[in-house]
Image (cartoon, rainbow, N blue to C red):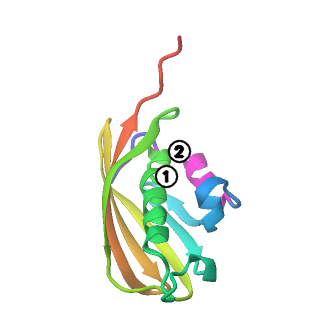
Amino acid sequence: MQFEHYDAKVAQSLASHEGAGGLAGFLGMRATQSGPGELDVEIEVRPDLLTPFGNMHGGVIAALCDHVLGTVCYPVMPRGSWAATTEFKLNYLAPVTAGTVRAEARIESLTKRTAVVRIRIMNDERLVGLAQGTVLVMPPKAAA
């Protein structure tokens, strides 16, 4: 897929950004790969992210999906635009108890106003979830 507005500098800043604030920082998300329409982000499984049953909380995996769903769009949108998740569906396929969880986001469709993104959630090399969502692409505000 070709992306008219791909900005390699934005993609590089996503892939090299460590220590993000907010929820992404709290959860320890770190981008490991970014390219045209692609973004991989990982979280280490930690005891404070587990349920009383010893599995990673589904909300952590959902937050990871929501994060990559919008973030993957920034390198391919016109500068100054912003992305807002409008919906996503997540299928949990297997429990996560240890290791690393990686969300592999890929843009399947991008128009001037929307993007559709598919996400594979891996626990080390095991597929543990699949997600797909829609992102609203908001153009830059006109200067007053």
* Amino acid on which disc 1 is placed: Thr
Which residue is painted at 48% across and 89% down in the image? 53
Mark 1 closeness class: few <14, some 14–19, many ≥20 residues within 10 Å:
many
Callout in the foreground (2, 1) = 1
Q: Residue at x 47, y 83 (%)?
A: 123
Q: State which region is magenta.
A: 6-17
Query: At 29% from the left edge and 40% from the top edge, which residue is drawn?
Result: 111
Q: Mark 2 sits on what residue?
A: 7
Per the rendering, the mark at residue 108 is: none
Q: CA distance from mark 2 to mark 1?
A: 13 Å
Determine the residue positioned at 32% across, 72% down: 130
The residue type indicated by label 2 comes to Asp
Residue 94 magenta: no
The image shows residue 13 at horizontal and vertical percentages of 63, 52
Q: Along the horizontal axis of the image, is 93 left or right of 29?
A: left
The count of marks equals 2
Among the 4 quarters of the image, the one containing residue 14: bottom right
Query: Which quarter shows the N terminus?
Result: bottom left
Q: Is residue 15 visible?
A: no
- Whichever of callouts 2 and 1 sits on the residue coming sooner in the sequence is 2
Mark 2: few/some/many CA within 10 Å (<14, 14-19, 20+): some
- Measured from the top left, where is residue 73 in percent x and y? 44, 49
Residue 16 in magenta? Answer: yes
Secondary structure at numbered mark 2 = loop
Residue found at the very far right of the displayed protein: 19
Asked if one can make out residue 62 in the rendered structure from this viewpoint, the answer is yes
Instruction: Give the residue at mark 1.
Output: 71
